[in-house]
Image (spheres, rainbow, N blue to C red):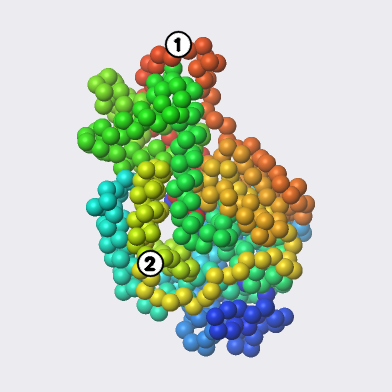
Amino acid sequence: MTASRGSRAAAVGACLAIAAGGVAAPAAVAAPSLTQFYQQDVEWAPCDTWPGLQCTQVVVPLDYREPDAERISIAVSKLPAADPARRRGVLLLNPGGPGGSGLSLPLEFATQRIARSYDIIGFDPRGVGASTPLRCELESDPPLLTRPTDAQLELFTSNARAREDACRRAAGGIRPHVNTPNTARDMDVVRAVLGEQKINYLGFSYGTYLGAVYGSLFPGKLDRSVLDSAVHPDWIWREQFRAQSRAIRDNVDEFMTWVGQRHGVYGFGTSREEVLATSEALGAKLAVTPWQSEIDLNTYDIVVGSNARYREIWHELASLMKVIRDDVEGAAPGPELLADATRAARVLRELGIAETMSGVFQTVTCEADWTTDLNTYYSDMREFRAKYPYGWGVLRAAPNECTFRSFTPTERVTDLKRVKYPAGLVVQAEFDPQTHYDGGPAMATRLNEPLISVADEGIHGLYSRNDCVTALVDRYLVDGVLPGSRTVCAGTPRPDVPADEQAGADLRPQAQPSPTLEREIRAFIDEKKLMGHHF
């Protein structure tokens, strides 16, 4: 639920009639108790950090059921439409997370067609960044164990308890009110403050769920909408976690199949099964003696699992595996290559998984109930260490803060539906490991909207990164033209490394790769502006 792109890594309707335990259908005008928020005046000024953007603060209730009680502020940014004569309103953005900062996000799209026709609006959701922040005390990171023994399973439990207690101590009375419906309500206040009857919306990752919740609560206030890399509407939230590990394994299987077709280059075997067996044997050796005192089995699982999603660097990833295996088996790569591979491994490890102690992620993902039965988690973890040890692996099946939730949610999970607002677009990559592909068709079906699928692609967040998706989204947001009900775009091409039969190889591994792994990987990261996010 990450996540956020570029600034996405390093991102609701006029009224609310609130009844106990649920949200009534929006009325035509703001409830009197909320008028002060909907009609507030704000002052825009140049953003301190981001030239070209204007910034302001919008005041909202902490608890929409008690609008005269505590208040919080929401930081909002604006990139005015480049062509005022063709302006068709505002386009709100959300980068995902939950907990991603969206203030600088409009700048990421300043050169896209949408920037000519819309005032592009970014914001930090409640609890995030320049808005009233929700903080948790720092606790130790989860144990970095991709294949824990039965005796080690409890380490995940004790860590989750400690992290939840750290949030309980620091978050105070804010935490029960940091959730998706309240963030959607904040969006509607922002809409009114901007003087707009309706908003348009572009959300990534968790932002797709936020957009669907906004449309469900404020259907008369949403115009065009794009949900890019969609959360599955029925997986809020534990199953969404589990699906990440399954998707990571799908990418690893695709990668190992590709490597097996190039045994003459990498020497790991001639099929996916052989490559997997060779890789597992290497991992077993790393569990005993880490390579260069840095890459043990856990780190190897993370490096391979977290980066198999990126087709463009499959050659570099496979070459790194070859260097590690050759060195472990005494083939003695040259010192220049060895040093380069060591640096490349560090870069890929850092590109992998960065857990965060931001209080928003582990609050919003607790808005739905999680099982408190530890045996359920332990059973899942035993399954995942065998089937899905790569990347997030076991961690995504383990107990977390929500298992020991110390607050009572103030909202029910929103019943997503599309009534009285136009059909938008859902966009999904086939091998997205952060929001599993199944989330795209499920969200498109739930909202009865067209789906754009991107074949053989593992990246998360497609608009502005995939030319086909970008053209279709622009044509919809700017020109109002929907694509077909189901459209398929091509993903990033795989590396131009000939398969064995194409190269006429004799299946003997070729010479060691040249010492440019780190340079190529860093160039890829810089070009794609990659950063990890959860959903």
Indicate the position of residue 292 as horizontal and vertical percent values.
24, 33
Residue 134 seen in this snapshot: yes
Q: Which residue is mark 2?
A: 372
Q: Residue at x 32, y 45 (%)?
A: 147
For this view, does 363 lie left or right of residue 223? left
Label 1 or label 2, whichever comes before in sequence order: 2
Q: Residue at x 52, y 86 (%)?
A: 66
- Which of the pair 414/274 is nearer the observer? 274
Amino acid beneath label 1: Asp
Indicate the position of residue 282 as horizontal and vertical percent values.
31, 30
Q: Nearer the viewer, mark 1 or mark 2?
A: 2
Residue 457 occupies quadrant: top right
Residue 337 occupies quadrant: top left
Indicate the position of residue 145 as horizontal and vertical percent values.
30, 48
For this view, does 231 lie left or right of residue 263? right
- Which of the pair 511/109 is nearer the observer? 511
Amino acid beneath label 2: Thr
Local SS, label 2: loop
For this view, does 315 lie left or right of residue 45? left
Local SS, label 1: loop
Image height check: is 423 above or below 319? below
Residue 225 seen in this snapshot: no
- Which of the pair 31/300 is nearer the observer? 300
- Which of the pair 325/49 is nearer the observer? 325
Indicate the position of residue 404 as horizontal and vertical percent values.
35, 68
Q: Which residue is mark 1?
A: 506
**Label 2 packing within 10 angstroms: few (<14), some (14-19), many (20+):** few
**Label 1 packing within 10 angstroms: few (<14), some (14-19), many (20+):** few
Q: Residue at x 47, y 50 (%)?
A: 244
C-alpha distance separating marks 1 and 2: 56 Å
Image height check: is 359 above or below 461? below
